[in-house]
Amino acid sequence: MAKDAAREEKCAWCYRPLPLRPGPGRPRTFCSRSHRQRAYEARRRADALMVPPGQVVVSEGELRKVHDRIYQLECAIEDVDADLAGRSGVAAHREALVHLLEAARGLVGVVIEPARQ
């Protein structure tokens, strides 16, 4: 269980799991120097635009892309639910899994970053 708790630590920029680092020292906050720098720049930009804490400005295009990908995944889940309602067995579940994986791949690597103006 301790291993699961350690895996919950995530990069403060991309929210991906931080690699485990044994030994003493301050816990990591970011997975890379570039993410630490981006977070710093975003904080400075937010201060300049007077964006309240806990809020970000995201480009409309990026937000639209994420919404589209989530909608595709929702549709795939509905398809799988309907397909599996009338079928059972390993082959049906394998087909359903492949369909879900194809829909979910569009979300792999997606990170919403604050808009830069």
Image (tube, rainbow, N blue to C red):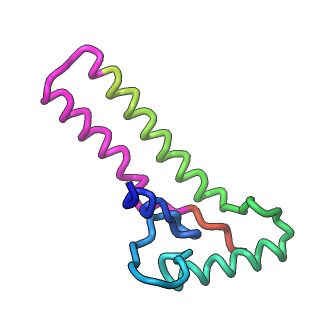
Which residue appears at 27% of the width and 21% of the height? Answer: 84
Q: Is residue 89 magenta?
A: yes
For image coordinates 60% across by 66% down, the residue present is 113
Q: Left or right: where does residue 86 sit relative to residue 28?
A: left
Q: Quadrant of the C terminus?
A: bottom right
Residue situated in front as seen by the camera: 49 or 26: 26
**Residue 43: x and y, percent?**
73, 75
Q: Quadrant of residue 29?
A: bottom right
Count the numbered circles shown: 0
What range is drawn magenta here? 83-111
Q: Locate the N terminus and report the quarter of the image it occupies.
A: bottom left
Residue 76 lies left or right of residue 89; in this view the side is right
Q: Is residue 39 magenta?
A: no
Of all residues, the one furthest to the right in this rendering is: 50
As drawn, is 44 to the left or to the right of 84?
A: right
| Residue 63 rendering spot, x and y as whole percentages | 60, 54
Residue 22 percent coordinates (x, y): 39, 79
In the displayed structure, 85 sits above or below 59; it is above
